[in-house]
């Protein structure tokens, strides 16, 4: 039987980054693979400059159930002052940048997108040769090394991840997750309301998991990290559809 790690994600604001082209930072309503890998890596204490991060990112599969019926989308604008480019001068800190002559500072305007009030149930499965077991990751999510946030540092978690282990099919893992978190939040009217909303679309990333679902859509997402130092990503397929009934 396959072992799964199940955990929840909920925050008032979420921003799952898409391609950062120009001044607009778009967000998807579904977490990217790189975002989920980054969340788990931060909990484990793997630093961004650590070479073993590239190996870590090649393992694990994620399946997602979003509860987004009550969600809304919005954007905000941010400004930042940066000095004009000067290849002859090295600036090591933010203080070094802003203490220059005000006439040498330029103001950049950017737009960021967010979703609010989306609750997620995540099923994580380790692959062959994975550097950490799901048991080790469960403990890390209970006691993370680094602070965790959902997409941006201004989006902290509003609930504990509450990870649990489950052994069985992916279909049964989602059925178990629904019952488990329904009971977990039975005294929380806000989260209970989200859990009782329509959430019949599921997302997964490996074709071997198709047997549990009726496919309605296949998307191409550029979110598989292959080199963290150079910010290189390669495309992968994201499947979405409806859950088949458990046998």
Image (spheres, helix red, strand yellow):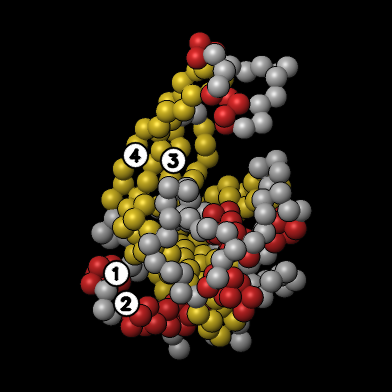
Location of residue 59 in the rendering, given as x and y in whole percent from the top left corner: 67, 64
Measure how far apart labels 2 and 1 are at the Cα level.
6 Å
- Disc 1 secondary structure class: helix
Looking at the image, residue 45 lies above or below residue 169? above
> Seen in the image, is 139 located left or right of residue 59?
left
Q: Residue at horizontal 71%, vertical 49%?
A: 49
Tell me which residue sits at (57%, 59%) in the image: 146
Residue corresponding to mark 3: 26
Determine which residue is flagged by label 1. 191
Q: Residue furthest bottom?
A: 247
**Near-viewer residue (44 or 164):** 44
- Residue 185's label in the rendered image is 2
Q: Position of residue 23 (x, y in %)?
A: 46, 29
Circle on res. 75:
4
Gap in Å between the C-alphas at discs 4 and 3? 9 Å
Ranked by sequence position, the earlier of labels 4 and 2 is: 4
Q: Residue at x 46, y 66 (%)?
A: 64
What element does badge 2 sit on? Answer: loop
Q: Quadrant of the C terminus?
A: bottom left
Residue 189 makes an appearance in the image: yes
- Which is more foreground, mark 4 or mark 2? 2
Residue 120 seen by the camera: no
Give the residue displayed 70% in from the left and 24% down from the top: 90
Label 3, label 2: how far apart the Cα atoms are: 31 Å
Tell me if residue 16 comes above or below residue 56 in the rendering: above
């Amino acid at each position: 039987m396959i072992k799964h790690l199940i955990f929840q994600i909920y925050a008032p604001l979420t921003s799952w980054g898409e391609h950062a082209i120009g001044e607009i930072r778009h967000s998807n309503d579904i977490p990217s693979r790189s975002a989920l890998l980054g969340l788990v890596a931060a909990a484990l204490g793997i630093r961004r400059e650590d070479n073993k991060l590239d190996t870590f990112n090649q393992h694990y599969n994620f399946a997602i159930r979003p509860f987004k019926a009550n969600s809304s989308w919005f954007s905000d604008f941010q400004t930042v002052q940066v000095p004009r480019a000067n290849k002859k001068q090295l600036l090591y800190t933010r203080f070094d940048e802003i203490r220059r002559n005000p006439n040498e500072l330029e103001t950049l305007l950017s737009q960021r997108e967010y979703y609010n009030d989306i609750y997620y149930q995540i099923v994580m499965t380790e692959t062959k040769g994975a550097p950490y077991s799901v048991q080790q990751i469960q403990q890390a999510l209970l006691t993370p090394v680094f602070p965790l946030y959902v997409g941006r540092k201004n989006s902290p978690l509003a609930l504990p991840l509450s990870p649990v282990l489950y052994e069985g099919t992916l279909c049964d893992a989602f059925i178990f997750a629904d019952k488990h978190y329904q009971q977990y939040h039975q005294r929380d009217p806000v989260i209970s309301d989200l859990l009782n909303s329509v959430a019949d679309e599921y997302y997964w990333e490996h074709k071997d998991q198709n047997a549990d679902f009726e496919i309605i859509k296949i998307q191409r997402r550029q979110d598989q990290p292959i080199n963290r130092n150079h910010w290189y990503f390669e495309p992968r397929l994201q499947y979405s559809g409806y859950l088949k009934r458990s046998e």
